[in-house]
Image (spheres, rainbow, N blue to C red):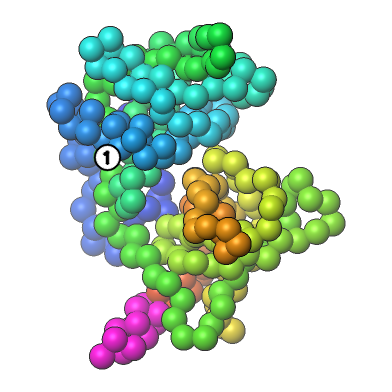
Amino acid sequence: MTSPTVSSNASSASATDAPFDVSEHRVRTLVEIRALLKQFVDGDVPLSLTTPDGLHYATSLWAEDPQRGVLVFAADPRDDAVQRLAESHEVMATGYLDSVKVQFDLNDLVLVHGRSASAFNAQYPREVYRFQRRHAYRVRPAGRSQPHAVLSHPDLARRQIDLRVIDISNTGVALMLNEELNLFRSGQLLPEVVIELDASTWLHVTLRVMHISEVGLSPTQYRRIGCELVDLSPGAQRDLLRYLDHTQKRHRLLTL
């Protein structure tokens, strides 16, 4: 399998950055690999299984067993994506531990069935890629502004959804969903989204859903939809970086 690559959106805007060297991010010792994988198991952190032809499946890592040399992922055999993944010869797992992006290839992926559940088994990875998103400075809106994103979801005909922006960086955005709508899934592409950050900053973007989590307790509980910004135009990148810089300055002034 080919080594993972990093989206151009995750790179710094500076033209003076050194060339990206994936070898600097390769983790090969069993102790380090297991430490990363255990965080996914213990925290029930979502993972996305993907293939080169664009297939995405959201799952979680149930178990990691280096003694048996196996990983066990949750799998719903009724989902068409599960059957297609089982037939694929090239599958990659991607997940996020705070600001760290973790990727690894899945070899010998097999769908197995038990009495009460089904699961994916795969070989324990010999190497994992760990990308610290150093340049993704995430900011929360400052002052009384209420940035929001408006999108037309493909499963909701003739209706737009308005989601509040929780925070944003030059690579991603976190959105707040207060409605009981089970519309979003990891890996899903959301085209033609309009993000209004302030009166002069409107971004027309495509979003890729990376993870979904429940935050808080009822009645104030909401879903946090973490998304990657996909293929920002040069103009949108400039507008976003200007907004991030301005917002960071406002936060510093408010703390003085």
Residue under the image location 55 percent in, 40 percent down: 187
**62 to 140, vertically: above or below:** above
The main secondary structure of the magenta stretch is helix
Residue under the image location 49 percent in, 58 percent down: 216
Q: Is residue 27 left or right of residue 11?
A: left
Q: Residues within 10 Å of mark 1 (few under 14, many from 20)?
A: many
**4 to 89, vertically: above or below:** below
**Does the rendering let one see residue 229?**
no
Residue under the image location 34 percent in, 60 percent down: 136
Residue most toward the front? 218
Relative depth, front residue between 242 and 126: 126
Relative depth, front residue between 102 and 36: 36
Locate residue 38: give its quadrant.
top left
The location of residue 3, given as percent across then percent down, is 33, 29
The location of residue 116, given as percent across then percent down, is 56, 14
Locate residue 127: give its quadrant.
top left
Q: Please, what is the three-letter code of the amino acid marked with disc 1?
A: Arg
**Does the rendering let one see residue 50?**
yes
Residue most toward the right? 158
The location of residue 134, given as percent across then percent down, is 27, 57
Identify residue for label 1.
Answer: 130
- Residue 252 in the magenta stretch? The answer is yes
* Magenta residues, start to end: 245-256
Question: For the N terminus, which image quadrant?
Answer: top left
